[in-house]
Amino acid sequence: MTNRSEDNKATLTYFLIGISSFHFINGIEQFVRKFKIEPAFWTTHPRNIVNLNKKFSQTVCMNAHDLTCADKEAVKTAIGVDKLDLEPLSPSFQEEFAKERLLVQENLLHRSDPFINNYTHSEIRDTVNNYFIIAYNLLKTYNPKFILYEVAPHTMYDLALYQLAENMGSKNILLVDTNIPSISFATTDFNNNRKFIKLSRNRQFGRNKLVKTFDEHIDKQGESIPFYMKNRKFSRSYGNMIYDFLKYLYADSKKSLATLIKTQNNLNKKKTGYQKKKGYLLHEKTGNSFSKLKKFILGVQLEILYKDKSKGFSLENVASYIYVPLSMQHERTTMPSARFMYDQKAYIKLLANNLPPKYTLIVKENPKQFTYIRGARTRDKRFYEELENLDVQFAPLEFSSHKLIKYSSAVAVTTGSAGFEAVVGHNKPVLKFANSWYQQLPGIYEINKGDDLKRFFLELENENCTINQEQVRSVLEDLKKFAIYLYPAGITVKKQGWDADLMSQNISALLEQELEVAEYV
């Protein structure tokens, strides 16, 4: 085989966006040692910057938080240009990418709290513009063959980059983690998870582990608690709430001085807009200590409210029902992966509006929702009151989700794993309002408008929603062919004791396959 020239080799440019987990970094090091092809551009957690700069001398490594804060000047300096192209401010660009801009803006509002942090409408608009200016200039400067994201882009700058990439000739590749332990899929489009990337057989590491884990997990569907929900309190007693509150106050007080210093430093730098970090990184930001305390208390109040509304719940009082397990917010599984259905009230209202009289809606809140204080509050008193006005019933946090699925007529989800459990573990049809990795399974009904619900309920009444489990198994076997022994979160990999070395080899193999560099060996 004839080797390509060094000039051709130099054109194999790629980006690594948000790659921060240790096993991902190890896999990239393996690839670079083998093929001597460094990434052109890499965004990562600040703790990795110094080490990566030492190991990858040809790579522009940037603190991901600078891009999250839409710091144009930092980008201009990093990529070595005198000025940035402002084409994203043009009328034609803004019109062409209006939907994409709206999604980035919604994600921005979802992940930060502009109301507590006193951000103006002008600052929000300018920040969205800056995300697209940054993305446009990065793509124009380097023209990467592909961009690898550790997970679905969800910190605004990466979402803008994702939205523009294919339009400007670059392929997106991202990992979709699943509720199957240690297993993910690589895809080119998180909005259409049928576009999976299949690693060639000689590049699949840990295949035996994957098959064993996959099959065991399928066999336990409908019985086991997902690995990410184990050892977690589903409902707190009032005593536990007080304990958590005191523990939070103690932990936060230790950070107060550092927060004050960081805040003053940021003010001294005269940052503007979303660059006003106020002592916390934007993607974690909840405001100052007082505003965080306020959110903590609000979480306790809402949990008490929810307990009250779910008091007296019993399945014996319900003949036929549709089960709606709420997804936690904010999380990338709801924004941006569920796109505009991140507003869960929207699809529940649509469902209620088309619900035949014989059915009841049973809603169960995510057990982690009330203790989560990062970003904007996505729940408030009105949220539950509006659902209550739709005559929904609230299931207690500790009530078995398995049982709610088992006795339901159908399950309604956006991207949640309850849909997978419903079809595979309980033979129940699923109403899906957004895309998910398992959406190819039989028994999953795509809902885009009210008429889709009308058709579904007509089929349900006529008993035409029977799921063929042989077809389910066949689709699962097909999915297994695309599955990769890999999981994006380094903390989870260590905690679960999965084989990080095999996962690193799969990252290296994915880069090798996508850059088509086998002949360099």
Image: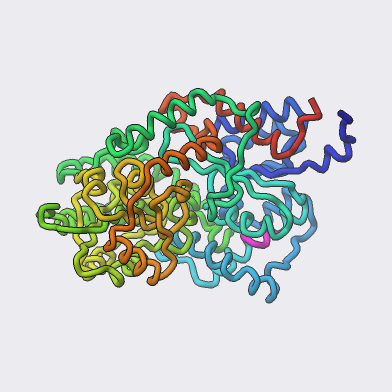
**Image point 43% across, 51% down: which residue?**
331
**Image point 20% across, 69% down: which residue?**
357
Q: Is residue 240 magenta?
A: no
List x then y, in percent, for residue 464: 33, 58
Q: Quadrant of residue 85?
A: bottom right
List x then y, in percent, for residue 283: 49, 51
**Image point 47% across, 49% down: which residue?**
440
Task: Classify residue 133 as left or right of residue 433.
Answer: right
Q: Is residue 133 magenta?
A: yes
Viewer-side residue, 24 vs 357? 357
List x then y, in percent, for residue 322: 26, 58
**Image point 22% across, 53% down: which residue?**
303
Q: How many marks?
A: 0
For the record, the magenta segment spans 131-136
Q: Is residue 223 visible?
A: yes
Q: Residue furthest bottom?
A: 91
List x then y, in percent, for residue 362: 23, 58
Q: Quadrant of the C terminus?
A: top right
